[in-house]
Every structure is written in structure tokens, then in C-alpha cells.
């Protein structure tokens, strides 16, 4: 069967139900985190943070917000990196699913500089939050184009240092490779179905360039990275 990747799909993901909870969701969150680590996804986001931190004094406290934080794996990686490199990180995970936030808190008990908030990022409470760097790892594709532009405006206004977007390339090859990964990692039905939809909700480079022009960004880079990701780094300083 041919896979049409010309346009982003509007098909919803099961995980978009913020009231979802239970063992199936916990298993999906943990396996997504595991795959992201093994395929270098966390490293890709960390590289973006490292680029934004160039020239920033290490004695300055840096507040980093992770949007759609899942089980908190990215924040724990950042906490370890900060500790090893003498950065003063204040790390905040944001997710709209209360069960997901509870699970992330449980896994992050050992890291004192990580906190979590259950928030809808379209609401005023999130828009009032101040931070230096905002991260979106495999989160932006969950939104429609007009929502992405609205969110990115908020991120750009509130982030004093910059933004790191790490998200999926929409391609037939990526789709087929994920089908193989589903077999290797024995993903549950929800993870398999959501993963395939996620790829079809992913991006072409031209779309990210279009967003950048619409947002009138002055300093940014968009690069293709393994495994079928785009790293979009936006600098404010």
C-alpha cells in the first residue's frame, strides 16, 4: 500500500485524550522514551540546548520547560547533564495528562531540580509562565498549523534564550521503518497506531521554513537528523 505524505494528516492520536490513564498508557510512555533514547532523540534535543547555552554564564540559573514531557526522560537527561557540567538548571515538565505527570514525578524523585505541572498550554496559566529555554520533543506534531503558530508565538515571547524543537519528518520511509520497530520493541496497539499517525502528522522542511517566516524569526536553523527528525533551533540572544 502506498503511503501518501504530501500533506499533514488531521487524524487524532489515542494519546491525545488527556483523561487517559492506566497501565497501557504507562507502558506506551516508557517505550516511547526508550526508543527515543536508543535512536538518539534525547541527544538531539540536548545538542540544541548546548547550542543555546553557548556564552551563557554557568552561575546563572537557567529555567528550562519541557512541553509534553511524557515520563520525564528528557528532563532527567538534562538534570544529569547539568550536574556533570556545573549548570544551575531549574527544570519544569508540562503535560495536560494528570496520569502522565504523576508517572513522571514518580520516576524523577531523585532529581530535586525537576518539577512537573499538569497544564493545558493554550490556557492563561501556562502563558503566564516565565522561562529561559522551551523544549518540544515529539510534541509539536500533535497540533494543527494554526495552533502551532499560536504556540510558537507564546514560546518566542516568553523564552529569554531560545527554543528547541525536535520532531518527526513526514516520509514513507520513516513510516515503514517504524512498522519494523513496532515488531522489534513489541509495542502495544496504542503505541503502534499512535506512532504511525505521528509520522503522518510530522513535517516537511518547507513547512518548518514557512512557520519561521510567518513568525518572522530572525535567528534559527532547521536541520534533518537521524532518525528521520528535524531539529529546529531558535535563538533569542
Image: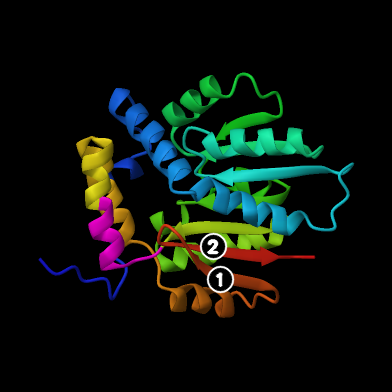
**Image: 164 above or below 110:** below
Of pointers 1 and 2, the one earlier in the residue sequence:
1
Residue depicted at 64% across the width and 19% down the height: 110
Q: Nearer the viewer, residue 106 or 82?
A: 82
Is the magenta region chiefly helix, strand or loop?
A: helix
**Image: 70 above or below 108:** below
Q: Nearer the viewer, residue 30 or 47?
A: 47
Residue depicted at 47% across the width and 57% down the height: 140
Quadrant showing the N terminus = bottom left
Q: Would you name the residue on which mark 1 appears?
A: 222
Q: Nearer the viewer, residue 226 or 194?
A: 226
Q: Residues within 10 Å of mark 1 (few under 14, many from 20)?
A: some
Where is residue 199 drawn, in percent x and y?
32, 58
Where is residue 184 drawn, in percent x and y?
25, 40
Residue depicted at 22% across the width and 51% down the height: 179
Q: Is residue 217 left or right of residue 229?
A: right
Q: Is residue 12 visible?
A: no
Circles 1 and 2, Cβ within 8 Å, touching? The answer is yes
Where is residue 124 drawn, in percent x and y?
60, 48
Magenta region: which residues?
A: 169-178
- Mark number for residue 231? 2
Amino acid at each position: 500500500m502506498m503511503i501518501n505524505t504530501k500533506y499533514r494528516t488531521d487524524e487524532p492520536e489515542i494519546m491525545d485524550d488527556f483523561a487517559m490513564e492506566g497501565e497501557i498508557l504507562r507502558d506506551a510512555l516508557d517505550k516511547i522514551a526508550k526508543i527515543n533514547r536508543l535512536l538518539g532523540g534525547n541527544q538531539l534535543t540536548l545538542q540544541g540546548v548546548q547550542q543555546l547555552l553557548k556564552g551563557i554564564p554557568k552561575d546563572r540559573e537557567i529555567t528550562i520547560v519541557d512541553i509534553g514531557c511524557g515520563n520525564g526522560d528528557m528532563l532527567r537527561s538534562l538534570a544529569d547533564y547539568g550536574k556533570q557540567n556545573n549548570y544551575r538548571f531549574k527544570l519544569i515538565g508540562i503535560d495536560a495528562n494528570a496520569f502522565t505527570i504523576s508517572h513522571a514525578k514518580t520516576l524523577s524523585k531523585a532529581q530535586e531540580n525537576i518539577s512537573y505541572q499538569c497544564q493545558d498550554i493554550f490556557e492563561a496559566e501556562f502563558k503566564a509562565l516565565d522561562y529561559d529555554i522551551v523544549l518540544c520533543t515529539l510534541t509539536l506534531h500533535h497540533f494543527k498549523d494554526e495552533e502551532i503558530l499560536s504556540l510558537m508565538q507564546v514560546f518566542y515571547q516568553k523564552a529569554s534564550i531560545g527554543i528547541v524543537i525536535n520532531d518527526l519528518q513526514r516520509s514513507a520511509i520513516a513510516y515503514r521503518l517504524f512498522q519494523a520497530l513496532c515488531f522489534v520493541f513489541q509495542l502495544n496497539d496504542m503505541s503502534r497506531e499512535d506512532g504511525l499517525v505521528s509520522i503522518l502528522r510530522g513535517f516537511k522542511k518547507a513547512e518548518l521554513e514557512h512557520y519561521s517566516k510567518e513568525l518572522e524569526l530572525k535567528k534559527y536553523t532547521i536541520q534533518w537528523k537521524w532518525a528521520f527528525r528535524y531539529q529546529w533551533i531558535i535563538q533569542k540572544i
